[in-house]
C-alpha cells in the first residue's frame, strides 16, 4: 500500500507506520541526549500514545529509567485503514524501549471505563506491585455516561459571546475566517464531564482502593492557561471551564493523598504545542504558528519532549518548581513571558495568508502536524509501498 497524507478538517485520516517509528525514535534520541535524573520507578500514563502523554512516557522511560504502563484509545489497521498514529507509536515505543531492559506495557481501550481501571490495577499489582507516578493526559471528544448509556460529547466553544478570528486549513494551506457561536449550558456541562477532572479522580480513587499506589505517590495532569489571544476560545470558553474543574479536582485529590499516602496531586500548566488535540481547536493553529515563530526568534522554543523532560527533571522530581498562587506548576513560563505574548499578539494582528505561510513558525507547525502522523520525514521514501500485511501482525504488549 502506498501511503500519502490524507487530512479532513485538520484531522489526519491515516498514518504512515514507518514514519511513526521515526517520530518515536526522534523523541527517544532527544531524551537520550539529555542528562538523566532521579525519578519514579513505576509509572502509569493514561493517554500515553501521542502528544504530551507520549512525551511524558519517553521522558520517564529514558530520563529516569522507569517502567511504564500506558492506557490509550487507538485503532489497529483494518482493510484499507492504516491504523491510527497512536497505535503505531505504541508499537514502536515498545520495540525501541526493549533496550532499556525495563517493563513497558500497553492497554488499548476506553480509559473512562471502570473495567479498564480494574484491569490496569491488576496489571500494576502483577507487574510492579505499586506505582509511584500517575500521569493523566487524556484529550477526548466524548465520554460515555455509564448511568444513562449516553455518549456525552465535548465542544470547543466560547461562553457568552461568539468568537471571531482566523484559523488554518492545513490540507489546503489557507488562512480562513472563523466564527464560533457561544455554547449553551448543556454544552458547557458536557465539556466539563468529558475534559474535566472527574475521570482522573475516579482513576486515583480506584487505584488507591486497590492498594496499588506507593507511599509518596505523585499524580499529575496538564492544563492550559494561555494569554489574551486565545482567551475567548480557550480559557474563558467551554474547555477553560473543564480545566477549572480539573484544577479543582487536583486540589481535592492533593489534600486526600497527602493524608493517606503522603503523596501529591499536581497540575502543570503546559505550553501550546502541535498535537492531534490542539490543531483541532479553532484559532489555535494561527496562535501556535505565531508563538513558535516568536519563541524561535528568542531562542526559547521547546518541543513536546523537551517540555515534559524539563517538567519531570526540574519540577516534579527536581528543585526548580515555579508555582503560581493557585498551586499550579508554571512550566509555560516561557510562553507566558510578557515580551513573547506581546510579540505573538502583534504578529497575529492583521495577519495575511502570505505573511502567515512565510513564517518559520508556521512551517514548523505544518511539519510537526505531518510528522505526528508519520509524514514529512526525509529518511522515508513515501513512493514506496508499505508492507501493511507484515506490519498488521504487530500488536502492543
Ligand atoms: P493527544 O490527542 O495528542 O493525546 C490524547 C491521548 O488521550 C491519546 O493517547 C489518546 O489515545 C488518549 N485517549 C483519548 N480518549 C481516550 C479514551 N477514551 N481512553 C483511553 N485513552 C484515550 O492530546 P494532547 O494535546 O497531548 O493532550 C493531553 C493533555 O494535555 C490534555 O489534557 C490537554 O488539554 C493538555 N494540554 C495540551 C496542550 C497542547 O498544546 N497540546 C497544552 C496544554 C495542555
Image: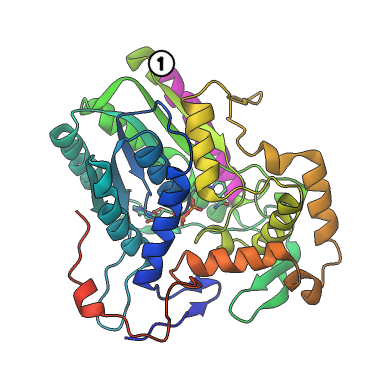
Residue at 64%, 39% in the rendered image = 332
Say if residue 350 shows up in the picture. yes
Give the side of residue 165 with respect to residue 169, left or right. Answer: right
The residue closer to the viewer here, 75 or 203, is 75
The residue closer to the viewer here, 321 or 278, is 321
Q: Quadrant of the N terminus?
A: bottom left
- In the picture of the structure, the residue carrying the numbered disc 1 is 258
Residue 227, given in percent of the width and then of the height, sits at 73, 45
Residue 251, given in percent of the width and then of the height, sits at 50, 25
In magenta, the rendered stretch is: 239-256
Residue at 80%, 60% in the rendered image = 348
The residue closer to the viewer here, 112 or 383, is 383
Determine the image quadrant of residue 255: top left
Residue at 51%, 78% in the rendered image = 8
- Is 381 situated above or below 261? below
Residue 22, given in percent of the width and then of the height, sits at 41, 63
- Is 244 situated above or below 392? above
Which element carries disc 1, helix, strand or loop? helix
- Is 4 situated above or below 205? below
Residue 36 belongs to the span the image colors magenta:
no
Determine the image quadrant of residue 128: top left
Give the side of residue 394 with respect to residue 257, left or right. Answer: left
Amino acid at each position: 500500500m502506498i501511503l500519502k497524507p490524507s487530512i479532513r478538517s485538520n484531522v489526519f485520516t491515516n498514518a504512515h507506520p514507518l514514519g511513526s517509528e521515526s517520530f518515536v525514535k526522534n523523541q527517544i534520541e532527544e531524551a537520550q541526549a539529555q542528562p538523566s535524573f532521579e525519578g519514579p520507578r513505576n509509572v502509569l500514563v493514561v493517554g500515553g500514545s501521542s502528544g504530551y502523554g507520549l512525551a511524558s512516557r519517553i521522558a520517564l522511560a529514558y530520563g529516569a529509567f522507569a517502567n511504564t504502563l500506558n492506557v490509550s484509545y487507538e485503532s489497529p489497521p483494518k482493510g484499507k485503514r492504516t491504523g491510527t498514529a497512536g497505535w503505531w507509536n505504541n508499537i514502536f515505543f515498545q520495540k525501541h524501549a526493549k533496550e532499556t531492559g525495563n517493563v513497558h506495557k500497553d492497554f488499548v481501550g476506553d480509559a473512562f471505563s471502570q473495567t479498564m481501571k480494574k484491569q490496569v490495577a491488576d496489571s500494576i499489582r502483577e507487574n510492579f506491585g505499586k506505582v509511584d507516578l500517575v500521569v493523566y493526559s487524556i484529550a477526548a471528544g466524548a465520554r460515555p455516561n455509564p448511568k444513562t448509556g449516553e455518549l456525552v460529547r465535548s465542544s470547543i466553544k466560547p461562553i457568552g459571546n461568539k468568537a471571531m478570528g482566523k484559523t488554518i486549513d492545513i490540507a489546503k494551506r489557507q488562512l480562513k475566517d472563523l466564527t464560533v457561536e457561544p455554547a449553551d449550558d448543556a454544552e458547557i456541562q458536557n465539556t466539563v464531564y468529558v475534559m474535566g477532572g472527574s475521570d482522573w479522580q475516579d482513576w486515583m480513587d480506584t487505584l488507591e482502593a486497590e492498594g496499588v499506589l506507593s507511599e509518596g505517590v505523585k499524580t499529575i495532569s496538564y492544563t492550559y492557561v494561555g494569554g489574551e489571544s486565545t482567551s475567548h476560545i480557550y480559557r474563558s470558553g467551554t474547555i477553560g471551564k473543564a480545566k477549572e474543574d480539573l484544577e479543582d479536582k487536583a486540589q481535592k485529590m492533593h489534600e486526600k493523598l497527602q493524608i493517606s499516602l503522603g503523596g501529591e496531586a499536581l497540575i502543570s500548566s503546559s505550553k501550546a504545542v502541535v498535537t492531534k488535540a490542539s490543531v483541532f481547536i479553532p484559532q489555535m493553529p494561527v496562535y501556535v504558528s505565531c508563538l513558535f515563530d516568536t519563541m524561535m526568534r528568542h531562542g526559547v522554543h521547546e518541543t513536546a519532549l523537551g517540555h515534559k523532560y524539563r517538567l519531570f527533571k526540574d519540577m516534579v522530581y527536581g528543585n526548580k518548581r515555579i508555582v503560581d498562587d493557585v498551586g499550579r506548576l508554571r512550566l509555560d513560563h516561557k510562553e507566558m513571558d510578557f515580551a513573547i505574548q506581546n510579540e505573538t499578539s502583534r504578529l497575529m494582528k492583521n495577519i495575511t495568508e502570505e505573511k502567515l505561510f512565510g513564517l518559520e513558525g508556521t512551517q514548523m507547525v505544518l511539519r510537526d502536524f505531518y510528522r505526528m502522523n508519520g509524514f514529512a520525514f526525509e529518511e522515508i521514501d513515501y513512493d514506496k509501498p508499505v508492507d501493511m500485511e507484515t506490519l498488521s501482525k504487530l500488536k502492543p504488549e
